[in-house]
């Protein structure tokens, strides 16, 4: 995989020549929206730093999606060329690279960011340059920019159904909530909205507790002991709502297991926890913990079978340094983003952002989740389904619940 650094090295990878190596930065910058030659799209996903293991694989799924487009003749008859970068989990670097891709490389669109803090750093760049960013993560909402396509779910379509499940008799009838997150905008905003939601249901502030840790935090021994003490207090069934990200996720679950706490005692709802976070972990002591996403690998749908086979084939053919048998939600969302972009460009007959954006309304297709996901002309949000999963012995999630249809996205929360 090619990298882009602070010293402004840019590499492009032709999706028709994937695996052929790293191309040097051209001496004379070319414009992606020239009338001939390939059209460029840019990736802003980190393959180093605390987000590397999960975020880095999104570079490859974008390249896989572009390769599929090119195999079918490209977009508007032009080959799609993918520019790959490594912002190194350094939030300002996302903005720096994004600006370079838009201004110097002339990419038609950006696909990127995992954390909300990285998206927030790129937001002014795409707005000032009239660019387009396809953002593949579920997130805190409370944002609606015409320069961002929000491919995944805001809290009303993901977090609240999961919390409702925890509080129901089908879940664990949860009454008390230990909210533990990384210290940035997504966990703090999610927890603010949850507190407003709990208050609307009649809970008082003694029912919850908040704690935050720095990015890359790994020593959870004292915090897990705090969770134990919280759980021992009266007031009903406790649960953990976990919003730590990156390498902190496996480190937290490892310590939870080390202290002998089972999901039957204190279940954890890991809002950013994915199949990939449990690679290499012994999940015997972790079975039963929960997550919620718009896609789980266990989905029984022909679209999912095709996607998983294509990913495995792509990994094998291109020496991709990630497991061929693990697919996570943001990979599917990033793939969906490339597909939406291509469909909109074909519909508009143009790669120019205003025309592409005006073509979003009415686009839909069945993605690997098995749902028919869609966009309207109302905003740049995508309607998609929701799953709640339970961790099993194979480091995967069994599906406990899934939505009927695709709820309409609600960008702004009424709870905080």
Image: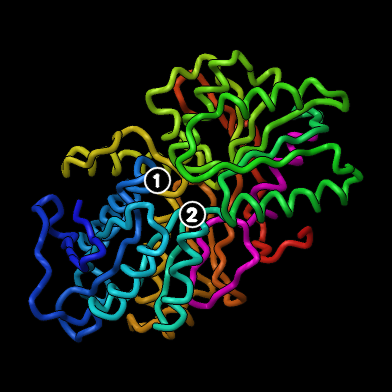
The label shown at residue 115 is: 2
Q: Quadrant of residue 348?
A: bottom left
Residue underneath mark 1: 51
Could you tell me how far apart the alpha carbons at marks 1 and 2 are, in whole angstroms? 9 Å
Residue farthest along the right direction in this orientation? 202
Point 59% across, 54% down: residue: 186
Position of the C terminus, as image quadrant, is bottom right
Q: Secondary structure at mark 2?
A: loop
Residue 124 against residue 301 in the figure, above or below: below
User: Is there any visible trace of residue 298 in the rendered image?
Assistant: no
Count of numbered badges drawn on the protein: 2
Of pointers 1 and 2, the one earlier in the residue sequence: 1
Point 59% across, 50% down: residue: 385
| Residue closest to the eye, 256 or 332 | 256
Q: Position of residue 279 (x, y in %)?
A: 39, 28
Q: Position of residue 67 (x, y in %)?
A: 23, 57
Badge 1 density bin: few <14, some 14–19, many ≥20, Cα 10 Å: many
Q: Position of residue 66 (x, y in %)?
A: 26, 60
Badge 2 density bin: few <14, some 14–19, many ≥20, Cα 10 Å: many
Residue range of the region highlighted in magenta in the rendering: 140-167
Q: Is residue 43 left or right of residue 411?
A: left
Q: Is residue 406 left or right of residue 48?
A: right
């Amino acid at each position: 995989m090619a990298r882009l650094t602070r010293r402004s090295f840019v590499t492009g990878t032709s999706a028709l020549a994937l695996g052929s190596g790293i191309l040097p930065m051209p001496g004379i910058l070319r414009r992606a929206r020239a009338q001939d030659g390939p059209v460029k799209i840019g990736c802003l996903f980190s393959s180093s730093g605390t987000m590397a293991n999960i975020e880095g694989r999104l570079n490859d799924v974008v390249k896989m999606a572009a390769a599929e487009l090119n195999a079918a003749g490209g977009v508007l008859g032009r080959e799609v060329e993918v520019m790959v970068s490594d912002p190194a989990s350094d939030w300002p670097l996302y903005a720096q690279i994004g600006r370079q891709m838009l201004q110097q490389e002339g990419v038609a669109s950006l696909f990127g960011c995992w954390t909300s803090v990285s998206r927030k750093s790129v937001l002014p760049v795409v707005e000032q340059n009239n660019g387009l960013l396809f953002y593949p993560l579920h997130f805190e909402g409370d944002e609606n920019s015409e320069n961002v396509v929000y491919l995944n779910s805001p809290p009303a379509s993901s977090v609240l159904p999961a919390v409702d499940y925890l509080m129901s008799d089908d879940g664990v009838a949860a009454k008390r909530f230990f909210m533990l997150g990384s210290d940035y905008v997504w966990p703090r905003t999610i927890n603010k909205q949850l507190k407003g939601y709990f208050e609307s249901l009649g809970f008082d502030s003694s029912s919850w507790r908040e704690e935050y840790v720095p990015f890359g935090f790994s020593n959870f021994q004292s915090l897990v002991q705090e969770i134990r003490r919280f759980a021992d207090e009266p007031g009903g069934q406790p649960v953990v709502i976990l919003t730590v990200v990156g390498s902190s996720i496996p480190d937290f679950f490892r310590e939870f297991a080390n202290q002998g706490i089972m999901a039957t005692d204190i279940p954890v709802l890991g809002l950013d926890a994915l199949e990939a976070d449990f690679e290499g972990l012994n999940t015997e002591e972790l079975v039963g913990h929960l997550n919620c996403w718009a896609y789980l690998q266990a989905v029984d749908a022909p679209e999912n079978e095709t996607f998983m086979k294509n990913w495995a084939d792509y990994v094998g053919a291109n020496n991709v340094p990630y497991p061929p048998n693990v697919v996570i939600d943001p990979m599917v969302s990033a793939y969906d983003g490339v597909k939406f972009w291509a469909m909109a460009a074909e519909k508009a007959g143009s790669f120019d952002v205003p025309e592409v954006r005006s073509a979003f309304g009415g686009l839909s297709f069945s993605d690997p989740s098995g749902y028919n996901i869609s966009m309207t002309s109302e905003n740049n949000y995508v309607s998609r389904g929701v799953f709640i999963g339970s961790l099993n012995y194979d480091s995967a999630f069994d599906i406990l619940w899934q939505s009927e249809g695709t709820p309409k996205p609600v960008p702004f929360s009424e709870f905080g």
